[in-house]
Image (tube, rainbow, N blue to C red):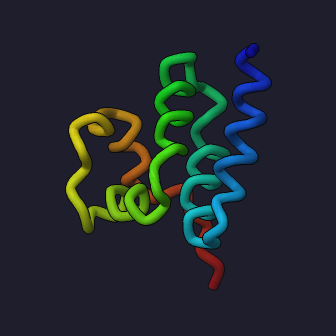
């Protein structure tokens, strides 16, 4: 599958998690960061999408320790949470 098709599928998956908060976190992260991702980063995010939303959100918010498998620059970027839109 080509890079653009993978990104389109990932965008859909990131924005259709089933929980509004997870949609905002993962979809917002995808929209803000994915344009510059290489194949390795796309593969990382594809694998992350297989995890449970509650786990991903806990890792990103720092309420649970990030498993070694997910530690690294992509998780550090996910943990910034500066991509989540907050309406006032």
| Quadrant position of residue 7 | top right
Q: Residue furthest bottom?
A: 88
Which image quadrant is residue 61 in? Answer: bottom left
**From the image, which quarter does the N terminus lie in?**
top right
Q: Residue 31 appears at what percent x and percent y?
A: 67, 45
Residue drawn at x 64%, y 72% is: 20
Q: Residue at x 61, y 44 (%)?
A: 30
* Total numbered badges shown on the rendered structure: 0
Asked whether, in this view, residue 46 is left or right of residue 61, the answer is: right
* Horizontal side, residue 74 vs residue 11: left or right: left
* Residue 2 versus residue 33 in the image, above or below: above
Of residues 80 and 6, the one nearer the viewer is 6
Taking the spot 74% from the left edge, 36% from the top edge, the residue there is 9
Q: Position of residue 78 (x, y in %)?
A: 43, 48
Q: Is residue 64 above or below residue 69?
A: below
Q: Quadrant of residue 42?
A: top right
Please tell me whether residue 39 is drawn above or below residue 18 in the rendered image.
above
Compare residues 36 and 24 and report the one nearer the observer. 24
Q: Position of residue 26 (x, y in %)?
A: 57, 54
Quarter of the rendering occupied by the C terminus: bottom right
The residue sitting at 26% across, 68% down in the picture is: 63
């Amino acid at each position: 599958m080509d890079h653009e098709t993978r990104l389109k599928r990932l965008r859909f998956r990131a924005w259709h998690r089933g929980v509004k908060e997870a949609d905002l976190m993962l979809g917002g992260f995808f929209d803000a960061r994915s344009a510059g991702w290489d194949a390795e980063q796309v593969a990382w995010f594809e694998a992350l999408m297989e995890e449970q939303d509650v786990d991903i959100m806990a890792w990103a918010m720092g309420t649970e320790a990030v498993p070694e498998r997910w530690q690294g620059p992509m998780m550090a970027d996910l943990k910034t949470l500066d991509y989540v839109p907050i309406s006032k």
